[in-house]
Image (cartoon, grey):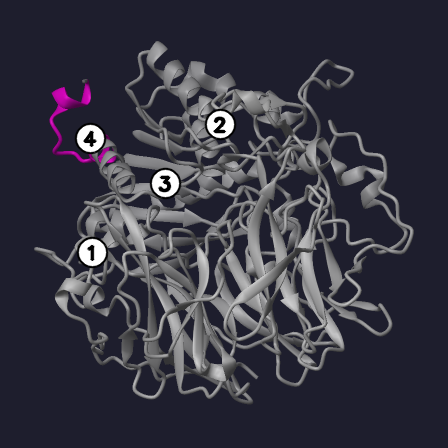
Amino acid sequence: MKIKTMLTATALLLSTVVPNAVASDIPSDFIGKQKPHTTDDKLTPELLWAMGRIGGFQSSPDGKTAVYSVSYYSVKQNKSHTVLYSLNLLDKTPQLLTQSNSSESSAVYIKDGRKIAFLSSESGSSQVWEMNPDGTGRKQLSSETKDVADFLFSPDGKKVILIMDTENTSSIQKNDKDLDKASGMVINDLMYKHWDQYTTTAPHPFVADFNGESIKNCVDLLEGEPYECPMLPFGGIEQLAWSPDSKTIAYTCRKKTGLDYAISTDSDIFLYDIESKKTVNICKPKGYETSNIDPTVSLKNQSVNAQDQDINAGYDQNPQFSPDGKYIAWLSMERDGYESDRTRLCVYELSSGKKNYVTESFESGVNEFCWGKDSETLYFTGVWHATTQIYQTNIKGNVKKLTDDVCDYTLLGLSADGKGLIAKRHSMSQADEIYHIQLKKNKYQIDQLTFENKDFYDQITMGEVKERWVKTVDGKQELCWVIYPPHFDPSRKYPTLLFCEGGPQSPVSQFWSYRWNFQVMAAQGYIIIAPNRRGLPGFGMEWLEEISGDYSGLCMQDYLSAIDDICKEAYVDKEHLGAVGASFGGYSVYWLAGNHNKRFKAFIAHDGIYNTQQQYVETEELWFPNWDMGKAPWYKDEQGKMQKVFETSPHLYVDKWDTPILCIHGQKDFRIEYTQAESAFTAARLRGIPAQLLLFPDENHWVLKPQNGILWQRTFFRWLDRWLKTNENSENKNN
């Protein structure tokens, strides 16, 4: 039976209760909730950065209140500030709990809900604090010499895990003591850099005692081991878990360094016994030894991925014990070296060691999950046909879809009574808000709990978002999202943008972005078509894997099919088309620049691959080019040819470039080095093609600082308007 939606979200404007404080107690540079300032109903980059961004959320044990975080940004101060709120779950009234000059985050209830624990840097370093549920009675609990990045209290409240950095010299050796001011680094192995930093430290979990008053006696679970836990760059406290009896810690770790780390995605789940201090790997069979690997060739067909037993060769992470302590579940990828492999949900029976993959009937990957109260049911999210919904399975693997909305859900966990779920929800027209989802037999009821940005939405007109299916060159169907300008008039003609997705295997679902925001683009008078081209999840594994080794093949034709299809509409200005994208989307733009047959009048490539041959040896995460490109570029076949992805690199088509291009890159981007953008910009200028280069010395693969974000948006639209708006001064275009 098809599940029907019963939407009960409150539409009332709710006021925020602020704790008693005199004005002099609030720091002059405190960044708090902002009011929208607009002269019309259009969403602007400035309004986007003024919105609050909801973070973590947890219900109190009695289910009456919740604590959650919101981050606010100041463009003027060029920084952000995170505050904590308490939410009355009956009348949905939020109460601001923190107004210090220090950001507070990671809030959770402890001591049966009588206290809230959180992170604060009020003492000069990031430490664990506690306060009363109304924000009073602040007290520092930890006093470590290092910053505490995150924490997790045991169920009995007697111990706590602290995440802190330890020294790591596995790739970069430590300089002589008398050269303490030397900036040089002696590098002995790969993975000496990762994402946006040099690897001189590694996060470790420390288990400590908590007597109710202070946190003491920290013990490093990975003492003497040069490994990361949680795993960088994105892993957090979700990569560790306590058993219900507080006697065991499960943690995620990829116990590799240097070259071995750079070519492998093989992380495992380990169990650490508090009493004996012994560690067991529950992913690998007893006595398992790592296979010999050729680091210059894809692992796809190597022996590590051709085992006659289940060795959990790929990513295994984010363990959770069942409430009864009989099982542990985690997210698992089957193949080593394939970071975009389908993520399965693995359930491990602790008494027998038996593993069962309980989402096999779901043709896409699992994003996150939680256990049901009965220790037999599990809830998870996954993308299918360009939306991320909530699903249910059990230890037998019976999968059932629970929600069916035009949005993306992020699962946060069970409600306090165990009868519902707490989730974030966003779409292309709304940023994250918190929802309670009450589950019933054949329907679900949604109750919106937070209304952080309602003031903004009340003053903004969003453009309509429509689903559009496009026929591909090989006769298949491609789902595209089309976003129309606010107050769309079909009798007019609009400049139109082709959005090229990154990943290369990340979905074009109902995402909300603070940079690549489709509603901001639409508000500037553009139609946007965003295809779920070949290589994106949510359409089966065949569709997902058609991109590997063939970057310039059907996925590029899918882009051209999408833009050609939307051009059939009379309201599309076919003479003013643009293509924009980041990461693999940037690669796509660079490739299209030499292969678009004069369709486009402007290009923007952010953090894109311009030269695939150079990218192979520039990136730090070698598993990425190894799998997707097949083998190193110096390998040639009998005819002397390289892999197709190298033979069709965008830089080899520069002789066909004929269209203005803006290249954007962060100089701290180690995934795709900024030299790629510099090379593309130089090539364009040498060929006499109008081009700009926007470099960010202090940004990584993303643009995170407020003023840089505004500069990005303004440069983005100035470039598009210059070439795609018909009323622009032609003389200006030639400058």
User: Are the residues tagged 1 and 4 within 8 Å (C-beta)?
Assistant: no
Q: Quadrant of the C terminus?
A: top left
Q: What element carries label 2?
A: loop
The main secondary structure of the magenta stretch is: helix
The quarter of the picture where residue 734 lies is top left
Chain-order first, disc 4 or disc 2: 2
Image: 636 above or below 217: above
Q: How crowded is mark 3: few (under 14 residues within 10 Å), some or many (20 or more)?
A: some
Query: Of the residues shown, which amino acid type is indicated by label 4?
Result: Arg
Residue at x-position 52% and y-position 43%: 503
Residue 587 picture location, percent across and down? 48, 31
Identify the magenta region.
720-734
Chain-order first, disc 2 or disc 3: 2
Residue indicated by mark 3:
703
Chain-order first, disc 1 or disc 4: 1
Q: Which callout, 1 or 4, points to the residue nearer the camera?
A: 4
202 left or right of 281 in image: left
Residue indicated by mark 2:
673
Q: Is residue 670 visible in this depiction of the protein?
A: yes
